[in-house]
Amino acid sequence: MKTAILLGATGLTGGILLQKLLKDPAYGKVVLFSRSSVAVKDEKIEEHLIDLFKLEEYGELFNADVVFCCIGTTKSKTPDEDTYRKIDYGIPVAAAKLCNENGIETFEVISSMGSSPGSKVFYNRIKGEMEEAVLAQNITNTYIFQPSLIAGDRVEKRFFENLAKNALKVLNFVLVGPLKKYRSIHPEIIARAMIQVDKHGFKHTRIQSNEIREIAEKS
């Protein structure tokens, strides 16, 4: 059975992924690194409550077959750009470096559609820079998930994000063909796809939103 490290288990997608990993007999242990407890009791869980900005200090505990990185924030939740960068860039890159150092062969990370290191949009630029830094670690199996807007209920309210989600629910019906990748996507679909890719791999490193859906349908 595999040991999986999960970063971001207290978030929307990460929380769903955690539940799926706990139910999947292919995974014997799920190691969590978080600032706060997930408050889930399961014999598979090994939980470490740490300062994620200092993840590199916990290399001796960072051992697994696969690392799932679901770390991410928003401008509304983290308006300070330096802190935003530490979360969306710093934590995933630190995790990728630990994978390299400790010989972990599979690293999966959630990025976003439109990510590009040359983007004029701060959010997209940080995600693009993160992707490039992760790929520079040359981990044997690196998969970057690039979903469109993630649908689903969050604890905190985000007015404009919710407005966009409601609009996309309508638009999803007309986004067909090459436009399918712009449809909003539920975190449950992303979680299913991440497990499927870990088990069976994928033909390329960057996985777009429509491909995430197709992968999840096979699970």
Image (spheres, grey):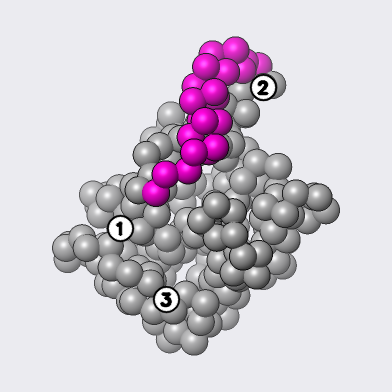
Image location of residue 184, percent across then percent down:
53, 30
Give the residue displayed 72% in from the left and 54% down from the top.
122
Image location of residue 128, percent across then percent down:
72, 55
Q: Which residue is disc 1 drawn over?
A: 27
Give the residue displayed 29% in from the left and 72% down from the top.
47
Q: Earlier in the sequence, mark 1 or mark 2?
A: 1
Asked whether 97 falls inside the magenta stretch, the response is no
Crowd around label 2: few <14 · some 14–19 · many ≥20 (10 Å): few
Could you tell me if residue 96 is visible in this image? no
Asked whether the beta carbons under mark 3 and mark 1 sit within 8 Å of each other, the answer is: no
Give the residue displayed 49% in from the left and 87% down from the top.
57
Q: Which residue is disc 3 drawn over?
A: 63
Q: Which residue is disc 2 drawn over?
A: 179
Q: Earlier in the sequence, mark 2 or mark 3?
A: 3
Give the side of residue 106 with respect to residue 176, left or right.
Answer: left
Residue type, label 3: Asn
